[in-house]
Every structure is written in structure tokens, then in C-alpha cells.
Image (tube, helix red, strand yellow):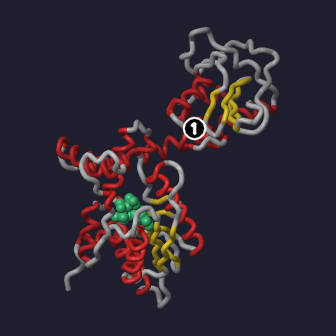
Amino acid sequence: MAGPAPVVAAARTAVARALDDVPAGSLVLVACSGGADSLALAAATAFVAERSSRGSRGSRALRAGAVVVDHGLQPGSADVAAAAAVTCRVLGLDPVEVVRVDAGGPGGPEAAARDVRYAALAATAQRLGAAAVLLGHTLDDQAEGVLLGLARGSGARSLAGMAARRDLLRRPFLGLRRADTEAVCAAHGLTPWHDPTNTPAPGDRAAPVRSRVRGEALPVLEDVLGPGVAVALARTAALLREDADALDALAAELLAEAALAAADASATGPAGDADAPGPAGDADTPGTPGPADAPATEQPPAGPGVVLDVTTLARALPAVRRRALRQAAARAGSPPGSLTRAHVLAVDALVTAWHGQGPADLPGPVVASRACGRLRLHPRTHEGE
Ligand SMILES: Nc1ncnc2c1ncn2[C@@H]1O[C@H](COP(=O)(O)OP(=O)(O)OP(=O)(O)O)[C@@H](O)[C@H]1O
């Protein structure tokens, strides 16, 4: 007997690999919108769970269910969600839950819907005791995100795109194309729902920007640069993920080292010699602490927050140091998504271009200030400090 179509087999293999560390007996949940990607994922996951039950002495090795989130943003969304849930049950997934959310939060409709969706998926997984939540993002989704990130001037972490695994979340289809998931659905006789906002009319400036990247920008790039642009963008994400992971690890080490050095210095008394401004107009001189003439009244930073040794920070490479400062700001209470490069450079200048400038204001609100060879990042108090 002929086996499944190659694309069906590829989808099943991708799901099985994504779940290879999930303990026997676990429940895994497919996040299903009813679109082609997540319906194909539901079909592949149902197969993998069913097959896992055959080789495990009667007890099901894996249980697979589904969560359908109804954002209530479009007329008929409840019907779309109900239809997706029915299809998931027919495929053999159990339990299947429809979760209604209120997507009217801040940040624009797309961002708000995404935030409440992820929160609903996490809450449902916790309530049902699921070991993993599977998402249907494909290589094309990854490529679109990288292109958007490039156009917005993002750094390596953002260009690294979506992780194949992060906490409970798994994205088995990052190596599959959107056309593959359509083909998997067709092979199973499934009719996916096509979200009308995903296919806006050309030039529709009111359409979600990601849909326009998908429908207009990427096709133009493929036309000009040749086919393979999406694959190349996804490869960029994979390469930068390795780089960003390495740099983040180095930055975390630097942060720990700089915090330890600051604590050691505190234990041995105020430094008092590293904070006099350098020569006037010398703001770009990197990493050169000024002469030992700090005002006698200056005290080392006190109170809560993150305290770091400036000399340790100044020795590091800019890419590592600026990441460490970003991590420090986040630790002090700055929402990472709100920290711009300008914010990070302002804190970096306190380390490498010190000329007695005042504190740097960061989102949170958090304040970064330098005194006695130490950099302190802390939540702004109501006294305005
Ligand atoms: N309403 C929803 N309910 C549950 N999961 C969802 C929902 N919307 C999206 N997801 C999950 O997030 C993934 C990516 O979402 P995105 O909005 O990019 O969907 P998409 O590209 O339209 O995918 P699909 O074809 O699966 O709808 C989906 O494949 C699915 O796993």
C-alpha cells in the first residue's frame, strides 16, 4: 500500500520531532485557528498521538487536544471557532476547547489579539496540565517577520525570529512552506478557513502590515531578486538566533561579573576615583575613567536596583556591554519591548563617554546614573530621583 503523500509525512515527522522530549502520558495542545497551517498541524498531531498509543502497552503515550481562541473581532468569529473545534474533534483530538477572549487591549488590534491569544493559550495549558502547546507558524511566517524586522532596523535578537521551542510553545512547521500546509489539508480532505484580513486588496493601506508584506512586499522581492527570498530570510533568522544566543549568554556573564565587582568594591569602601568627567569635549573617548578627583561629597549608589562596576563594563566589547546594559535595565524594571537603541546608548554613554552628564531616563520609569565608579539602574521613586 502506498504511504502518505511526502508532504503529509513531512508534517508528521516535524510534529514527532517537536514532541520528542515530551514525557509519555502527557497532554499536548494544538493552537488551532481553523486556518490551513494550524489545521494541518491538528491533523499531523492527531496522527502522531494516535501512533504513539499503539507502541505503548495499551496506555496512550501522548494525548493530543486543541484550543481555539475566539477573539470576537470579526462578525461570525464564534462560528469560525466552532467549526475549527468540530474539525479538531473529528480528527480525534480530545479535549478541544473554544476560549473566548476580549482583544480590545492596547497596541493596535493585531498586537492586542496576539497578546491575549498567547495569554489564553498559556492559561488553558496550565488549567489542563498540558506539556506543550503547538503553533502552526511556517517558514513563510518566519520570513515575513524577518523582513519586517529588517525594515524597522531591528537587532539580531529580533531578526532571529520565532523560536522553534520556547517554554511550553513548540513550532514544528518552521521548516514547512505555507503551500505545504495547504497541501496537507487537501490530502486530508480538510477545508481551511481563509481569514479575509490575510489577503487584502493590493494597495489597501488600512490592511494589517504583515498581510501586506505577505501579499505584496515578498512577491515583489521574489520577482526582483529571484525565488528563494523567503527561504533565505528564514535562514538569516536561524543564523542570527545562534549569534544572539551567544551574545546574550556573554552579556549575562558580564552583568554578573560587573555586579560582583560592584559588590566587592562596596564591601571595601567607596571607590571615589573613577567618576570625574574626562576632558571637556571628549565624550566619545571609550572606557577611560577620569582622573581621581571626584567630588568628596559623592557617595556610591545606594538603595534598590542593579549596581554595576563601570570599569568591568568598559572593558567589554560594545555588542556585549550594550546587551548587558539592556538586560540590566530590564532587571531594574524597564519593559524590554520599550527599550530603544537610543535608551541603551544613553546608558552606555554613562560608562564609556562620561563627562559628568546627568542620569539617563528609561521606560518603566527607570533611572540610570553613575557615581563613584558604579552604574546604578533603579525604578524612579515618586520623589523624582
Ligand atoms: N484564533 C486562534 N486560536 C488558536 N490558535 C491560533 C489562533 N490564531 C492563531 N493561532 C495559532 O498561531 C499560529 C500563527 O498564527 P497566525 O495568525 O500567524 O495564523 P495564520 O498564519 O493565519 O495560521 P493558520 O493558517 O493556522 O490560521 C497559528 O498557526 C495557530 O497555531
Residue drawn at point x = 76 percent, y = 36 percent = 382
* 163 over 46 or under it: above or below: above
- The quadrant of the picture showing ligand 1 is bottom left
Q: Is residue 50 visible?
A: no
Query: Which quadrant, please, contains the N terminus?
Result: bottom left
Q: Nearer the viewer, residue 306 or 379?
A: 379
Q: Is residue 30 visible?
A: yes
Q: Where residue 377 appears, x then y in whole percent?
A: 68, 34
Q: Is residue 271 left or right of residue 343?
A: right
Q: Nearer the viewer, residue 143 or 105?
A: 105
Residue at the far front: name it: 75
Q: Nearer the viewer, residue 205 or 296?
A: 205
Residue drawn at point x = 27 percent, y = 78 percent = 188
* 326 over 70 or under it: above or below: above
Q: Nearer the viewer, residue 369 or 67?
A: 67
Q: Where residue 350 appears, x then y in whole percent?
A: 62, 24
Query: Which quadrant, please, contains the C terminus?
Result: top right
Residue at the far bottom: name it: 58
Q: Is residue 5 left or right of residue 148?
A: left
Q: Tag 1: residue type?
A: Arg
Q: Is residue 326 left or right of residue 61?
A: right
Residue drawn at point x = 23 percent, y = 43 percent = 221
Q: Where residue 342 appears, x then y in whole percent?
A: 52, 30
Q: Where residue 173 appears, x then y in whole percent?
A: 35, 63
Q: Residues within 10 Å of mark 1 (few under 14, many from 20)?
A: many
Give the quadrant of residue 14: bottom left
Give the quadrant of residue 226: top left
Q: Is residue 5 left or right of residue 198?
A: left
Name the residue carrying label 1: 326
* 282 over 213 or under it: above or below: above
Residue drawn at point x = 30 percent, y = 49 percent = 212
Looking at the rendered structure, the secondary structure element under dot 1 is helix
